[in-house]
Image (spheres, grey):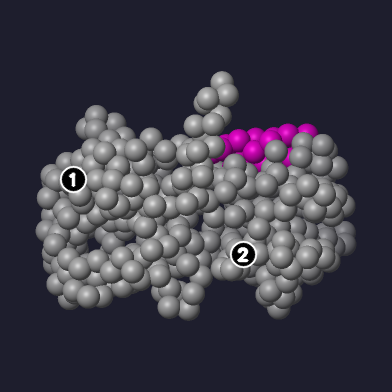
Amino acid sequence: MLIGIPKEIMAEEKRVAAIPRTIGKYIDLGFDVGIESSAGEGIFISDDEYEFAGAKLFPDAETLFAESDIILKVNQPVLNERMGKHEVNMLRDEGILIGFFHPAAPENHEMLRRLLDKNVTAFTMSYIPRISRAQKMDVLSSMSTVTGYKAVIMAANQMPRFIPMIGTANGKIRPAQFLVIGTGAVGLQAIATAKQLGGIVMALDIRESACIEAKNIGAEVIAFYVPQDLRADNESHARSLEGDWLEIEKNIISFHLEDADVVILSAHVPGEVAPILITEQMISTMRPGSVIIDISVDQGGNCEVTKCGQIIQRLGVYVCGIQNIPGMMAMDASSLYAENIYYFIENLFKNGVGKIDLKDEIVKSCLITDGGKILDQLTLKALALQEASLNLE
């Protein structure tokens, strides 16, 4: 079987799904590997390096897609404007697609319908389960680590003041205060980075285990009691609070916003719309020049005024909705992603090349389409809601 690695074509995307080190690993498993010319230029890997690792070089995406049994991508398939063709339409009928995307997101529904028409077996790395056996494949954790770090650096670049305490002849300048909401992998790395830069960090999460981890790396945890059955699902993902509990959470956040110089927002549930935790009225209580980095923007955002892909100023506060933060650190992000997806392939074909194990727990969790059907329940729910909304209109 031929594994194909195309050049990513989304705007500003420099990552790639395989590096020379993982090319050799695929060949050791018994696969052939093809790569589109210049696929690695964004991370300074030349075509010669890929060829030296054993990959066959393809001059264009269309040829690569046509000949590959399996396509590995970083992002979801999109329209290749230069060629005038959608990447899904270039896939082989009944081929295999593996990438990192959110199938339940409304903007991906048309892409899913194209996959069904081509009878493609599609997997998303965003659904890797939180079990010990899957840790080496956990793209969410890998990319979240990159995101948490870079989010703090972005905030430091945007804010008009120091992060650490600075001593001057006129006295001391106080350290910046961070409020990190959501202390999963993103939040924990943000806490660690902010502490390393000399900031004071407060953290909020509805999961007791996440709060303990935040406290262990130096954050002051904001007390917020939530009943156990409302906190998290079976995989330790936080649940979205609703009704009175959501209002209580927003009131607690509002109280701490007045002292925050930087707010890092990463509270969301995979496959669901992120809850609004900061309203425009709440922003009015923040110091002028403060910064909000809304990492949940891909799922709607945790801040009411966030604009996707933009940094705006509202009531004297900078609100950042920049997407694809891992793509801004493409070298390390590609290295991590390439290893994650390699281990997924190794598990997917553990019975041999060409023999997919669809009964495996990890495989079933990530399987989105197969046999002309959508198998993911979150995606089916989202599609049903979209249809209902259209019927009401």
- Which residue is at the front of the view, 20 or 346? 346
Going from N to C along the chain, the mark reached first, 1 or 2, is 1
Q: Is residue 219 above or below residue 372?
A: below
Cα separation between marks 1 and 2: 36 Å
Residue closest to the far top: 393
Q: Indicate whether 200 appears above or below 301.
A: below
Estimate the x, y position of residue 356 in percent, counting from the top left.
24, 66
Question: Where's residue 293, x and y in %?
Answer: 64, 49
302 vs 60, left or right, is right
> Within 10 Å of the Cα at label 2, are there few (<14), some (14-19), or many (20+) other Cα atoms?
few
Q: Which residue is mark 1?
A: 93
Percent of width and height locating residue 197: 67, 66
Residue span colored magenta: 305-321
At label 1, the amino acid type is Asp
Question: Which residue shows up at 71% across the image and 57% down it?
Answer: 181
Instruction: Find residue 3 and report its image quarter.
Output: bottom left
Residue at horizontal 42 percent and vertical 62 percent from the top: 365
Quarter of the image containing the N terminus?
Answer: bottom left
Q: Amino acid at mark 2?
A: Asp
- Residue at 62% from the left image edge and 44% from the top image edge: 301
10 Å crowding of disc 1: few (<14), some (14-19), many (20+): some
Taking the spot 53% from the left edge, 61% from the top edge, the residue there is 144
Q: Nearer the viewer, residue 15 or 225?
A: 225
Residue ID for mark 2: 233
Q: Which quadrant of the view contains residue 79?
A: top left
Q: Quadrant of the C terminus?
A: top right
Query: Is any atom of residue 12 visible in this view?
Result: yes
